[in-house]
Amino acid sequence: MSQQTDPDKPEENLGFLLWQTNMIWHRELNRALENIGLTHTQFAIISALRWLLKKSNAVTQKAIAEQSRTDTMMVSKVLRKLEKKGLIERKQDETDTRAKCVFLTPKGVKTFQEAFKITSDSNTAFFSKLSNESSFRNALQNLIQIDESS
């Protein structure tokens, strides 16, 4: 039941507001993470990898892309950077010779832990402006579920 918005009133356009909010949030997280040499995108990829490694010892680049809802080629580029930093390593998959399994190094685990604390603190500050965080979380989860059914 979305109403058409006035093209001369971007402050009323939900898509534009979501985009602006995302850009501000993303910029703040990048600033917070720069002290440990990570970008928010790199942290998101490490987080997806870490979560997947809790369920499987054979995590591929494709699985990381699916988990993080990102492009496989972008994940590949980010993984190359993370590998150069010594945060992850890739080994040939024993069952699929075309795929490589991705693992966190001990340095990657330590960096994740630092980054998680930093992003948690940054998120707490950013989202403290919400009057009802739970309702906002539910609304975002609903939007994600709509995307999954497409």
Image (cartoon, rainbow, N blue to C red):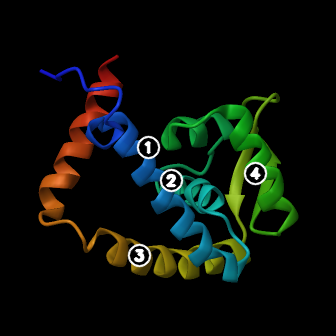
Residue type pointed to by label 4: Leu
Q: CB atoms at circles 2 and 1 under 8 Å apart?
A: yes
Q: Do the residues labelled 2 and 3 touch (CB within 8 Å)?
A: no
57 in relation to 24, above or below: above
Q: Quadrant of the C terminus?
A: top left
Q: Nearer the viewer, residue 63 or 118?
A: 118
User: For this view, does 31 lie left or right of residue 8?
Assistant: right
- Nearest to the observer: residue 10 or residue 138: 10
Residue underneath mark 3: 120
Question: Label 3 amino acid?
Answer: Ser
Residue lying at 12% horizontally and 54% vertically, measured from the top left: 135
Can you identify the residue that label 4 sits on?
79
Mark 3: secondary structure: helix
Dot 4: element: helix
Residue 35's disc is: none
Residue on which the image places disc 2: 23
- Left or right of 127 on screen, residue 81: right
Q: Mark 1 points at which residue?
A: 19
Where is residue 109 shown, x and y percent of the image?
62, 74
The mark lying in front, picked from 2 and 3, is 2
